[in-house]
Image: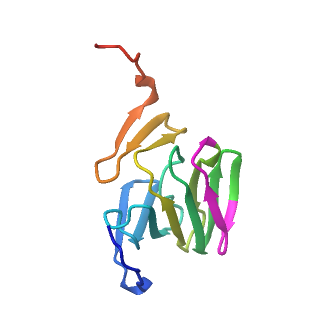
Amino acid sequence: MNDEILIINEENLIGKRKAEHQEYEFVKYEVTPRKDFNQCYLAIYEIPPKKANYPYHYHKANTEAFYILSGQGILKTYKGDRNIQQGDIIVCPPCEAGAHKIINTSTSESLKYIDFDTKNSPDIIHYPDSDKVGIILQGESSTFFKNANKTNYYEGE
């Protein structure tokens, strides 16, 4: 755990690009690496035109907050799509009503934002569009399950 004040210039952050699925792509600049900070995760994201960074989801244990630095897009929510733009602050509570997906709607500009997350572990993440659940345990690989595979508590015992 880091017990020092962190001051870092954005120009000194190293971006990590992720593009594992046609609809999803981003570059993430970690400000507070997960291994070094145990209560808050902070990163800057850049989403290319016509892409999203993550599927529609909500957390059961962690709040996510976003500050849009530049660009515009759509925030898919539990109550429908909402337009987002530079200067918007978005807070997604850890519940079904906090479900969200950020989509860059521009054809030419990146959507850039700061992501602030609490880091309660374990966290359970629900993906309503694909009917799956993820279990995130800090410092370990994430595990995902389809809800169709639910079973009785005593099955196989």
Model colouring:
rainbow
Give the percent coordinates (x, y) of residue 136: 38, 46
Taking the spot 43% from the left edge, 65% from the top edge, the residue there is 26
Query: Is 32 on the left-hand or right-hand side of 69?
Result: left
Give the percent coordinates (x, y) of residue 47: 49, 67
Give the percent coordinates (x, y) of residue 95: 59, 44
Q: Nearer the viewer, residue 105 or 100?
A: 100
Q: Nearer the viewer, residue 57 or 34?
A: 34
The relative height of residue 111 versus residue 65 in the rendered view (above or below) is: below
The relative height of residue 53 versus residue 11 in the rendered view (above or below) is: above
- Range covered by the magenta-colored residues: 83-96
Taking the spot 39% from the left edge, 61% from the top edge, the residue there is 38
Q: Quadrant of residue 65?
A: bottom right
Give the percent coordinates (x, y) of residue 13: 37, 79
Quadrant where the image shows the N terminus: bottom left
Q: Quadrant of residue 73?
A: bottom right
Query: Is 51 on the left-hand or right-hand side of 135?
Result: right
Q: Nearer the viewer, residue 28 or 117?
A: 117
Quadrant where the image shows the C terminus: top left
Taking the magenta stretch, the answer to whether it contains residue 90 is: yes
In the displayed orientation, state which residue is furthest to the front. 3
Q: Nearer the viewer, residue 44 or 153?
A: 153
Taking the magenta stretch, the answer to whether it contains residue 92 is: yes
Taking the spot 35% from the left edge, 63% from the top edge, the residue there is 34
